Image: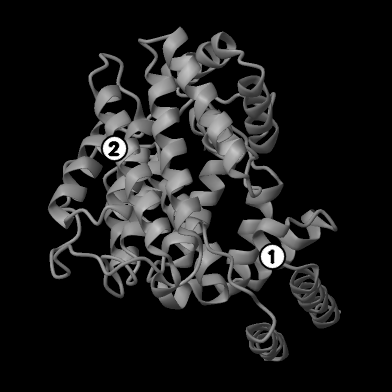
Amino acid sequence: MKTKTLVITVLVVLILSFSALSCKLFQRVSQGPTPTSTQNDPISPSGPTVPGIVSPLDSTTTRKKLSAEISARLKKNDFESIESLANSARSSKQRIPGGFWKLYVIYDGLTEPNLEQKSTELEWQEHIGRLEAWKTAMPNSVTAKVATAGAWVYWAVDARGEGFAHTVSEHSWQLFRERSQMASDELAEAKKSDLKCPQWYVVALSVGLVQNWSRTQYDKVFEEGFRLEPTYYHIQREKLTYLFPQWNGKNGEQGAFIKENASRIEGDEGLIMYFLLTSILQSHYRMQLFQKVDVPWEKVKEGYQALERHYKTDRFRKNQYAYMAMFGRDIETASAEMQEIGDDWDPEVWGTRETFENIKKATEDYRSIQSRNQK
């Protein structure tokens, strides 16, 4: 009883201290114009199951290290090495610790001039210029075209800014529309390539969000991407963003989508998808994750364990799992994970050191009570 009371007390205290950290693209555009799609359409229909093929693991790098390396290579106009790395990652379907697709991380290093830091207009112009030079040097490169489309999307979002829609100037809206259309045009060119890339669908769905595609149009592109690469979960991430109630979804649709999509993938990869999709929403819903998204914690837990078996985990995933365990009301798992983490906390997950220390103290108290009870 004391242990349960402790957990509840900690949860109440943390309501006052947690700050929401939305995923970057959603955070920047979530106050956009009212979507024009039909709100009462159902979510994507269930389809036949697909084999859950486990990908090979490249344990020689990390997510942030690789994206920074790719960004540096682009600034040196080292197009050939980027092309080679991307082609290898695409064909091998490699992942890196934490379950991240290596291909996606490579594209992440090409999306913005300064990797998640604010960039000037001049830096954006130079960045687009380098991508255009890559396309000129390698006109058949689908990687260059998809990367350019992705950059146009983020530059469009940069023009719009993070404020409410009524605070955005007409000039900014015009830039937003022009740049998102440039992304759409780039995607149309990339689509002509014989080489199909799963990242094409990630960028296309982000364009669909900012251009207010109908549910029918959006689902058609999503299903095509899912059939191409079912476990490239970054595609599903875009659908989760589309299903926020602020956009095209209704309460409960995100949880239903997670269950339905994960169930379409056989074996451990289906379980891994369950964890990955739920974890994507952790940064938005924070401590209310399992109240807002109706998914069973035990299924999420199984997914994490499968991910750990096949792809290992990094600091980010370990911290994320501890956080989710705490608010999935599994304090025993949270306690064990926090003990393993020690002081190696991840700001991406916790937001502030104070939040991390609050949970850490709660799990230490839990272990202390458990120890006394066993005596």
Q: What residue type is labelled 2?
A: Ser
Tally the numbered discs: 2
The three-letter amino acid code for the residue at tag 1 is: Trp
Q: Residue at x 56, y 38 (%)?
A: 124
Q: Mark 1 points at which residue?
A: 350
Distance from Cα at disc 1 to Cα at disc 2: 35 Å
- Quarter of the rendering occupied by the C terminus: bottom right
Q: In this view, does 101 lie to the left or right of 346?
A: left
Name the N-terminal-most of marks 1 and 2. Answer: 2
Where does residue 26 sit, x and y in percent of width and height?
45, 59
Give the secondary structure at mark 1. Answer: helix
The residue wearing badge 2 is: 184
Report x, y in % for residue 12: 64, 89
Q: In this view, does 81 lie to the left or right of 302?
A: right
Residue 52 in view here: yes
Quadrant of res 102:
top right
